[in-house]
Amino acid sequence: MTEQALRETRRDRSPRDLAALVFFPVVCVVAGVVGWRLGWHLGVDNAVYRSGAVALLHGEPLYDNLFLSDEPSWARLPFTYPPTAALLFVPLALVPTQVAWGLLGAVSVLAMALVVKLAVEALPSRPRWMTPARTTAVLGIVLLGIEPVWRTIFLGQINLVLMALIVVDVLLLGARGSRFGGVLIGVAAAVKLTPLIFVAHLLVTGRRADAVRAIATFLLLQGAVFALVPHDAVQFWGHAVRDPQRIGPIYWAGNQSINGLVLRLTDNADWSMQVAAPIGALLAIPCVLWVRRLHLSDRPLPALLVTAFLGLLVSPVSWSHHWVWAVPLVVFLLSRLPDPLPTGPQRRAAPAGVGAVVLVFASCVLLAMRNGKAVEFEWGPLEYVIGSAYLLVPLAAGAILLVRHSRRAG
């Protein structure tokens, strides 16, 4: 590395950037401790995670009753995750509920920063101003304002942490050819089943050994929990995993999957997945080809994003806070800006794509829509379009890229 490059690296890693990255995690921990002392209601979903871990430690069944006995009165929700998740949530049981929320929030903010950093480093080309440390510091603050991110932290959800596990596995371990490749995807899938789609991503991108390790890790954790709590394992895989009522009405506007849209269009028809699944299968065909092509052209980040957004579309339930994959999407879109930016009207037009994506996910439009108590079934055409804002982002992006590719080919 040249002396000039070293000086640029030092400027990129300024104490101000480090302080910015540490500030919000500290705020989360302090808020958790203060909330514990004052009895605040912090992190509904985090309280469910923690209660599942407490139930596991005390030998209480996870799925026999609708609610767990340790859940606070303000967080009465069923435990809907695999029993392996309860096992991995055990550290949360060691501290009070609000403190657990603060700690998970701090880890989530740092996980998002790690995702931004790895996404920037995985780009084969980027504008000169888009340095890893500075971009991580700026986006690590700015993107706290998009709804999937702040809602994940507010609810005490695990989405940012799971995304970080997948990004580390695909963009870091995969790039290094690590013998631990696939393990983190297996762990993520043991917490929530939807990350299993990234096993297919490993196969499509030629990482067969990593795919085997991912499945082996997932099955090993299932076997461990079956040995510890066989009743819970049988109850989950035999009954709870197929019971949509455990996660509430999935026709709500917050469910931004194809299945959620079909449910809203059909007044909660019980055959919605029979329509959504074939649509998802049709989308998967071009996506597999696209991922393979991106991988062969050494573009791992957009390849990963195609798989991630396909997973969000085809999952039976993709709540709005699951759409944290907007974070690396923004990184990728920023990398596509010209360097230097053009002047005049073109300068304003260049960031339009980035601005549109940020606007959709920062607008909180889904929270502003008429929703709940089956009011979604009364929506008009415009409300259906606005109320499908998140799932329209990857569909619109795919359509734009397809048109551009067709024009170049022609």
Image: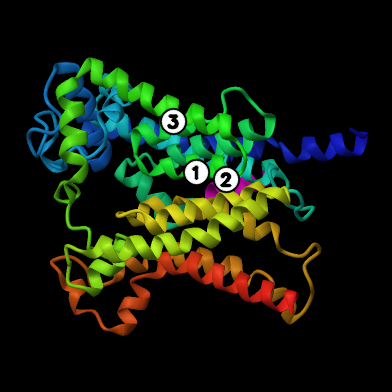
Q: Nearer the viewer, residue 24 or 322?
A: 322
Amino acid type at image mark 3? Ile
Looking at the magenta stretch, what is its main secondary structure?
Answer: helix
Q: Is residue 135 magenta?
A: yes
Q: Is residue 314 left or right of residue 248?
A: right
Q: Secondary structure at mark 1?
A: helix
The image's mark for residue 215 is 3
In 3D space, how far apart are the residues under numbered discs 2 and 1 (Cα atoms)? 6 Å
Q: Which residue lies at the image location 50% right of the left edge and 55% below the top edge?
A: 326
- Classify the position of the C terminus by image quarter: bottom right
Q: Secondary structure at mark 2?
A: helix
Q: Which residue lies at the image location 63% right of the left edge and 25% below the top edge?
A: 178
Please rate how many residues cluster around mark 2, counting C-alpha atoms within 10 Å: few if below 14, some from 14 to 19, many from 20.
some
**Sequence order check, earlier mark of 1 and 3:** 1
Q: Is residue 123 left or right of residue 50?
A: right
- Classify the position of the N terminus by image quarter: top right
Residue numbers of the magenta segment: 134-141
Residue 219: give x, y in percent of width and height.
Answer: 37, 26
In 3D space, how far apart are the residues under numbered discs 2 and 3 (Cα atoms)? 15 Å
Residue 152: give x, y in percent of width and height.
Answer: 37, 47
Residue 167: give x, y in percent of width and height.
Answer: 55, 39
Q: Is residue 46 left or right of residue 152?
A: left
Q: Are marks 2 and 1 in contact (CB under 8 Å)?
A: yes
